[in-house]
Amino acid sequence: MSASIKQAADIIRSGGLVAFPTETVYGLGANALDSLAAAKIFELKERPAFDPLIVHIADPEEINGLAVIRPGLAQNIKALAAKFWPGPLTIVLPKKASVPDIVTAGLSTVGLRVPDNKIALELIRQSGCPLAAPSANKFGRLSPTTAEHVRQQLPELECILDGGSAKIGLESTVIALPKDGFAILRQGAITAEDLAKILPVSRQPVKNNGLASPGLLRSHYSPGKPLYLLGAEPPLDKSRTGCLVLQKAPAGFARTEALSPQGDLRAAAANLFSALHRLEADRAVEYIVAEPVPEEGIGLAIMDKLRKASFRWK
Ligand code: AMP
Ligand code: MG
């Protein structure tokens, strides 16, 4: 069914789950202050309990109820929020007791962001609570960038808000804020160069208390077929292989997906998961080879996803 924001907010308030669009990928949301509701996310996604959830807020002011702001840090957070929120930046901060341990997978920190999507913001406001939300897919599988992707992966989910295709199509950049600047925990749409215009790059080693970021798992985001980086693949029958490239698709493959005919890395990022979903769904495709993209700007995040998708097939 195509639900209204009001119906969705009622479900959130009564402890249920709702899939909703964000500018990065579709999220599977629950009241972040309700540990039972958050537990349902782990259950439906089959997500391991060590993998923390990002908490989505509608207004930067809401940080104060969820995280402890070290003296001296308020200005830095304000500057980051002014520049990047709403947007694909998750800031990891020491958590307050109000955030249940299950949400942060037992970590003493919580990841927070303001999503840049009207439906998401309205859902948070009408629910009257922050939303814990990972991507709305089974754990380890491709992230959904359309409502249809969510329906296919989580058919048992009753409420999916449809906001069309995700604008960015890649997960948020996750950062920590040590005293001397920022440290990237997971690559995403906002790059180190973007961040360095606001804060210095930290020179301190980032302490990983437990597994600091699921984004740090070596295998993640995989389609249900062997995926190899082009150049590192075993001998394959081209007629049974799908090929993912940036610009120009070579001939002879069972299916080809060009991410951006203009070679634009932002457009490529927005198309990445949809293209992988199509390769996954095409029965003529048994194997996937993916052409590496230039590792600059958002290309770093694209390559991070492709390496993780290919890891188990090495
Ligand atoms: P996703 O499933 O795409 O929403 O991924 C959530 C990501 O946020 C995880 O992969 C973690 O990398 C990151 N994250 C969330 N909370 C924290 C936290 N407290 N500390 C470090 N990373 C976090
Ligand atoms: Mg995910």
Image (tube, rainbow, N blue to C red):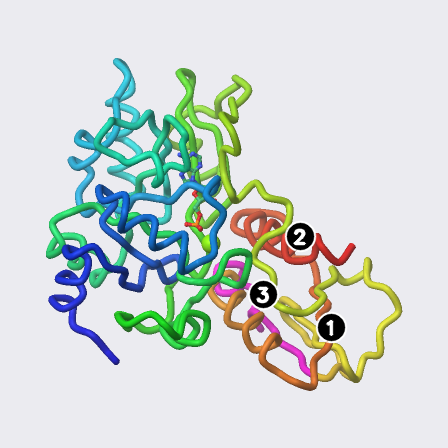
Which residue shows up at 66% across the image and 79% down it? 256
Q: Name the residue beneath numbered marker 2.
A: 307
- Amino acid carrying label 3: it is Gly
Q: Earlier in the sequence, mark 1 or mark 2?
A: 1
Label 2, secondary structure: give it. helix
Residue placed most toward the observer, 258 or 163: 163
Query: Circle 3: is it few (<14), some (14-19), or many (20+) Cα within 10 Å?
Result: some
Residue 263's disc number: 3
On whether residue 183 falls in the magenta region, the answer is no
- Tell me the SS state at disc 1: strand
Pick the front one: 65 or 174 = 65
Is ligand 2 less than 8 Å from the beta carbon at label 1? no
Q: Which residues are magenta?
A: 255-268
Residue drawn 35% across the image and 39% down it: 102
Q: Position of residue 42 (x, y in %)?
A: 40, 52
Residue 234, horizontal then vertical, whole percent: 86, 64
Quarter of the picture holding the N terminus: bottom left
- Choose mark 3 or mark 2, whichever is in front: 2
Within 10 Å of the Cα at label 1, are there few (<14), some (14-19), or many (20+) other Cα atoms? many
Residue 266 shown in magenta: yes
Q: Position of residue 227 (x, y in %)?
A: 70, 64
Q: Which residue is mark 1?
A: 287
Residue type at mark 1: give it. Answer: Tyr
Q: CA distance from mark 3 to mark 1?
A: 24 Å
Q: Residue at x 41, y 55 (%)?
A: 43
Among numbered discs 3 and 1, the one appearing first in the sequence: 3
Q: Are marks 1 and 2 in contact (CB under 8 Å)?
A: no
Secondary-structure class at tag 3: loop
